[in-house]
Image (spheres, helix red, strand yellow):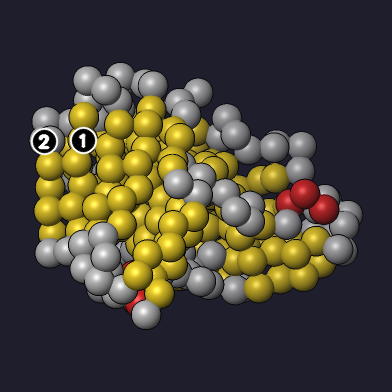
Amino acid sequence: GENVEQHPSTLSVQEGDSAVIKCTYSDSASNYFPWYKQELGKGPQLIIDIRSNVGEKKDQRIAVTLNKTAKHFSLHITETQPEDSAVYFCALGEGNKLVFGAGTILRVKS
Amino acid sequence: EAGVAQSPRYKIIEKRQSVAFWCNPISGHATLYWYQQILGQGPKLLIQFQNNGVVDDSQLPKDRFSAERLKGVDSTLKIQPAKLEDSAVYLCASSSYHSYNEQFFGPGTRLTVL
């Protein structure tokens, strides 16, 4: 089945710095690329998504970029804050199915 | 709009016992998903329902796991008998017909099998 690799597995940044998480995939049929944030004891929450006909999407401090040729997409968080600390998952969508990456633990140090 | 509801939030059982989880999706969402999330991993799809029919259960260990969605609303996931490796968080998610890509997750049920 489809596989998505997510890097890094852990990321520590100083408050105010930027954080970047990258995912690579192999299935060209994927057309939907969401990012989820999961806080301790909660379910994943959709924070931003991008579709295959768009290269970049931004929502305040978060942005997602997609390179379909190279088959990778990235999450960018600027001006990080302590409340951004969580586990972030990328996912691949095809139809109404999602395949998730292994996750990145983001720690924002104040 | 109320989110996806799940119960119980936590469950501890001994191996070979049975357990059941309940999910109530967002009102009007036709598609319901059950995921298994093992500690340190991303969610893995177990089964997907469209209304009350199964769309995909290829990853469901059918010798011990079963799920149903009677009347196309609430769903239950059962494990019988449980094994140690079933310890995980079981997440329920739902999506609407028109925004089928966007899945909304419940808080999950954390299962510990001793």
From the viewer's perspective, is the residue at label 1 or at label 2 nearer? 1
Give the image quarter of residue B4: bottom left
> Residue at horizontal 44%, vertical 57%?
A11
**Does B14 sit left or right of B27 as displayed?**
right
Which residue is found at the position 44% from the left and 33% from the top? Answer: A4
- Mark 2 Cα within 10 Å, few/some/many (few <14, many 20+)? few
Kindly identify which chain the residue marked by label 2 belongs to.
A
Q: Residue furthest bottom?
A: A110
> Which residue type does callout 2 highlight?
Val
Q: Where does the image place residue B73, in percent across and percent down from the top left?
A: 42, 58
> Where does residue A29 sit, x and y in percent of width and height?
30, 21
For disc 1, the marked residue is A66
Q: Compare residues A1 and A6 and report the one nearer the observer.
A: A6
Q: Which secondary structure lies at badge 2?
A: loop
Q: Is residue B68 above or below residue A51?
A: below
Give A48 or B96, whichever is nearer the viewer: A48
Q: Viewed as shown, does residue A75 lie left or right of A108?
A: left
Chain letter for mark 1, please: A
At 61% from the left and 73% from the top, the residue drawn is: B8
* Quarter of the figure with the C terminus of chain A: bottom left
Residue B25 in view here: no
Circles 1, 2 touching at the beta carbon (< 8 Å): yes
Examine the image and state in which quarter residue A26 appears: top left
The quarter of the displayed image where residue A98 is located:
top left
Few, some or many residues within 10 Å of mark 1 (<14, 14–19, 20+) = many
What percent of the width, then of the height, locates residue B62?
A: 70, 36
The numbered disc on residue A56 is none
Q: Which mark is residue A54?
A: 2
Residue A88 appears in view: yes
